[in-house]
Image: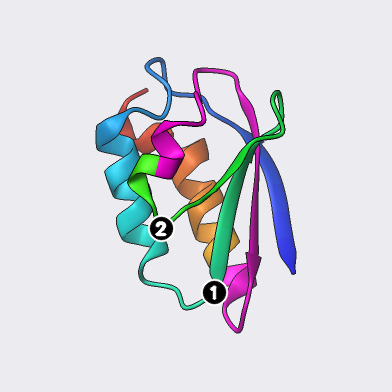
Amino acid sequence: MYAMETKIINQTGLHARPAATFVSKAATFSADITIQNLNTGREANVKSIVGILTLGLFKDTPVKISAVGGDESEAVKALVELVEGGFGDT
């Protein structure tokens, strides 16, 4: 398992458009990937847009992205890069 922690930086949080971008990027990896809201402890599969949207990931929410599988580290690093880049919404 490989995991990294980061924080949602875009002003509007992880709403529908960035969540769709997140899911699309996650789908390019074979690893099983989850995102956890570190404020609530709730987590979701990052390949499920509905799951992500139910986590309430607003600006400044700390999250942990974890993956298990052959490309786990690449998957986590790519998704953390998307989050830290603000999905272009910053």
Element at badge 1? loop
Q: Secondary structure at mark 2?
A: loop
Residue carrying label 1: 31
Q: Position of residue 27 (x, y in %)?
A: 36, 67
State the image coordinates of residue 81 (x, y, percent, origin top left): 51, 49
Q: Quadrant of residue 76?
A: bottom right
In the image, taking residue 49 as reference, residue 51 lies left or right, namely right
Residue shown at 37% from the left, 22% from the top? 90
| Neighbourhood count class around disc 2 (C-alpha, 10 Å): few under 14, some 14–19, many 20 upward | many
Q: Residue at x 32, y 26 (%)?
A: 89
Q: Residue at x 27, y 32 (%)?
A: 16
Which residue sits at x=34%, y=27%?
Answer: 15
Q: How packed is label 1: few (under 14 Cα within 10 Å), some, or many (20 or more)? A: many
Q: Is residue 89 depicted above or below 50 in this figure?
A: above
Q: Is residue 63 magenta?
A: yes
Distance from disc 1 to disc 2, alpha carbons, whole Å, reads 10 Å
Side of 10 where 64 appears, left or right = right
Question: Label 2 belongs to which residue?
Answer: 47
Q: Name the amino acid type tagged 2.
A: Lys
Check the picture and name the quadrant holding the N terminus: bottom right
Q: For the residue marked with disc 1, what is the amino acid?
A: Ala
**What is the span of residues highlighted in magenta in the rendered image?**
51-74
Q: Is residue 25 left or right of residue 6?
A: left
